[in-house]
Image (spheres, helix red, strand yellow):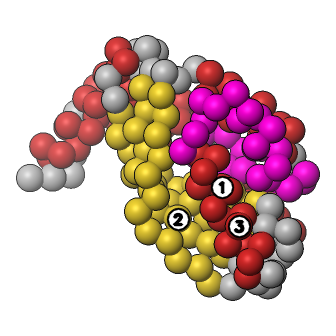
């Protein structure tokens, strides 16, 4: 498939911008592998795990509550790892600050959990996120689907949180400057594949 020069230029610009914020480098991959190795792979107390998953789900379905930051701190272990494809963070205080700012900067953020599975101490949640923000898409609701991999400590607190979702469609393509470029590239790629 041959792409026009303007499309290639836009694609490289988008990829270059995306690489600054997404986990694509070997160092980022190794950081995730380290987080996997550092977290307990064996299932802990079943009741604690069940309670921890319920606490996690509730946290992300009520991000506008005034006690949100405190609930983040009690949901995540002190040395927790989070990678949501936009950022990679370590420590429940850093995660609490990030998630609290995310909640403040959105008019609304709703998570619906549609499926759940687990293997050992790996817990998988498939979800739909609906976010409204004046900065993104003029306040119109944005819908995104994804999956979260969680690991929990023996007390049911999150030690590792890794999200898998299409951040280009769910976030980047709605940014004022980058968005039209990503939409143009996606439409050209779709047309060329027909």
Q: CA distance from mark 1 to mark 2?
A: 10 Å
Q: CA distance from mark 2 to mark 3?
A: 15 Å
Q: Which mark is residue 51?
A: 3
* Spot occupied by residue 48 in the image (x, y as percentages of width and height): 77, 73
- Labels 1 & 2 near each other (Cβ < 8 A): yes
Residue 77 appears in the picture as rendered: yes
Residue 72 horizontal side relative to residue 188, left or right: right
Residue at x 81% of width, y 38% of height: 70
Residue 169 appears in the picture as rendered: no
Q: Is residue 67 magenta?
A: yes
Q: Which mark is residue 125?
A: 2
Q: Is residue 10 magenta?
A: no
Q: Nearer the viewer, residue 178 or 59?
A: 59
* Spot occupied by residue 99 in the image (x, y as percentages of width and height): 68, 35
Q: Which mark is residue 56?
A: 1
Q: Secondary structure at mark 2?
A: strand
Q: Is residue 35 above or below residue 21?
A: below
Classify mark 3: residues with Cα within 10 Å, few (<14), some (14-19) or many (20+).
some
Q: Quadrant of residue 29?
A: bottom right
Does label 1 or label 2 sit earlier along the sequence? 1
Which region is colored magenta? Answer: 61-89
Q: Is residue 113 above or below residue 2?
A: below
Classify mark 2: residues with Cα within 10 Å, few (<14), some (14-19) or many (20+).
some
Q: Nearer the viewer, residue 94 or 172?
A: 94
């Amino acid at each position: 498939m041959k792409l026009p020069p303007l499309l290639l230029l836009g694609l490289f610009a988008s990829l270059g911008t995306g690489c600054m914020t997404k986990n694509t480098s070997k160092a980022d991959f190794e950081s995730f592998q380290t987080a996997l190795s550092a977290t307990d792979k064996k299932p802990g107390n079943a009741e604690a795990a069940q309670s921890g998953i319920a606490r996690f789900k509730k946290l992300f379905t009520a991000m506008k509550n005034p006690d949100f930051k405190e609930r983040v701190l009690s949901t995540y272990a002190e040395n927790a790892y989070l990678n949501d494809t936009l950022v990679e963070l370590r420590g429940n205080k850093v995660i609490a600050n990030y998630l609290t700012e995310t909640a403040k900067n959105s008019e609304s953020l709703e998570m619906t959990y549609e499926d759940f599975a687990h293997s050992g101490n790996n817990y998988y949640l498939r979800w739909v996120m609906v976010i409204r923000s004046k900065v993104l898409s003029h306040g119109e609701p944005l819908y995104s689907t994804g999956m979260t991999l969680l690991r929990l400590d023996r007390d049911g607190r999150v030690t590792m949180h890794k999200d898998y979702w299409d951040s280009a469609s769910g976030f980047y393509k709605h940014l004022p400057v980058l968005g039209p470029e990503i939409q143009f590239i996606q439409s050209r790629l779709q047309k060329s594949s027909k």
